């Protein structure tokens, strides 16, 4: 990726070495972290080297020449105003500069604007959230309606205790996994995977792992809006998936309908609460009508936050025959494997480079229960 801001913009802190060397270095780092538990090869899944980010957030910096996109400097003490940002998906790149031109030519759009967030999909659909330090009135909405038409984008305005949705607040993503295309609604300010190309590879890897090692019925914790749940569901008779976010659960149910999936039950629960329910320590109204005893749960997928798994969840998944662990923080993955290694062996491992040109790594491991 050629970018004029390498060496100053804090978004891409790895810029001095070419991408293949960066990927090799990350693979070696992950291999060292997993060495106490796994001696096999780690499969790296690379990112495209440009136009790979489906989400982007920019500060808006105002000076005498107008409004500018800005990112935190590498020194974390100042900001860099941008002339280009080649890491974002092409639908974002095609709209972000015309948007800035419109903002700079219209006082209603530019006044007290302090940030812009983009969410896009490989389908080309793009949602733009404009953040303000002032109330948004009908005049702003008229200008924003015209802007949305010019940019062929969805626009949302936000200010303190105010949210203005002009048409809809999501984009539709379509991912080909194996031989089937899966449809997802990605909502504004909800968690979505940032790199759709690596995400597609990650889902495909998890599906192959489930097909090869999976047994019984399938359980997923931290399911989000069904990113993994839907493509893995045809491999099992019954699926139960948990997620704590109300918006993600809403999107998950909509995604079930869009994809015609009928064997998945989504439940709004934390992993800790689901552990308590499975162990019979607590009853939940949110599980009314769900007979957990009817599930032969032997395969589980977890995709926890950076903090990794809590003690109760580690104890719970140690009972499953097969564990597919997707991690956005290999350090906490290695910590969790110290305990899980007592009951399971690591049968496969992969590196998913969702954040090219940064030190950040995502990893996946498959754990299979030890015999006896």
Image: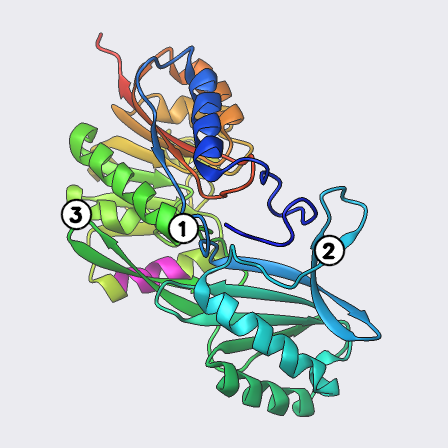
Label 3: which residue?
234
Query: Going from the N terminus, do you reach mark 2 or mark 3 first?
Result: 2
x, y percent for residue 54 = 47, 58
Image quadrant of residue 143?
bottom right
What is the CA distance from the residue labelled 2 to the residue labelled 3?
47 Å
Magenta span of residues: 251-257
Kindly identify the residue that appears in the image at 47 percent across and 51 percent down.
194
Q: CA distance from mark 3 to mark 1?
A: 25 Å
Tell me, yes or no, if residue 237 can be seen here: no
Q: Earlier in the sequence, mark 3 or mark 1?
A: 3
Give yes or no for residue 44 being in the magenta stretch: no
Q: Which numbered circle lies on residue 80? A: 2
Left or right: 64, with 123 as reference point:
right
The tag earlier along the polypeptide, 2 or 1, is 2
* Label 1 sits on residue: 286
* C-alpha distance separating marks 2 and 1: 47 Å
């Amino acid at each position: 990726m050629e970018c004029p801001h390498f060496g100053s913009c804090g978004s891409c802190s790895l810029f001095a070495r070419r991408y293949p060397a960066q990927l090799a270095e990350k693979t070696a780092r992950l291999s060292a972290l997993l060495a106490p538990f796994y001696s096999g090869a780690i499969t790296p899944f690379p990112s495209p080297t440009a136009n790979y980010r489906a989400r982007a957030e920019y500060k808006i910096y105002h000076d005498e020449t107008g409004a500018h996109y800005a990112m935190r400097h590498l020194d974390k003490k100042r900001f860099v105003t941008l002339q280009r940002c080649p890491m974002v998906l092409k639908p974002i790149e095609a709209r972000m500069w015309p948007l800035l031109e419109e903002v700079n030519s219209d006082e209603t759009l530019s006044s007290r604007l302090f940030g812009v967030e983009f969410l896009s999909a490989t389908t080309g659909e793009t949602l733009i959230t404009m953040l303000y330090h002032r109330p948004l009135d009908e005049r702003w909405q008229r200008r924003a309606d015209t802007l949305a038409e010019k940019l062929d984008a969805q626009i949302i305005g936000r200010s303190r205790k105010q949210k203005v949705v002009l048409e809809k607040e999501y984009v539709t993503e379509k991912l080909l996994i194996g031989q089937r295309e899966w449809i997802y609604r990605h909502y504004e300010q909800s968690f979505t995977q940032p790199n759709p190309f690596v995400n597609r590879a990650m889902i495909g890897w998890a599906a192959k792992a489930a097909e090869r090692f999976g047994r019984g019925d399938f359980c997923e914790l931290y399911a989000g809006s069904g990113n993994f749940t839907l493509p893995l569901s045809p491999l099992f008779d019954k699926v139960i998936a948990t997620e704590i976010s109300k918006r993600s659960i809403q999107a998950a149910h909509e995604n079930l309908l869009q994809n015609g999936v009928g064997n998945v039950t989504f439940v709004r629960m934390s992993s800790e609460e689901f552990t308590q329910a499975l162990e019979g320590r607590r009853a939940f109204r949110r599980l009314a009508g769900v007979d957990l005893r009817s599930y032969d749960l032997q395969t589980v997928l977890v995709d926890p936050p950076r903090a990794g798994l809590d003690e109760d969840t580690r104890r719970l998944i140690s009972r499953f025959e097969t564990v597919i662990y997707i991690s956005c923080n290999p350090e906490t993955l290695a910590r969790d494997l110290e305990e899980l290694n007592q009951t399971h062996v690591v049968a496969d491992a992969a590196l998913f480079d969702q954040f090219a040109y940064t030190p950040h790594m995502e990893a996946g491991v498959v754990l299979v229960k030890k015999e006896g």
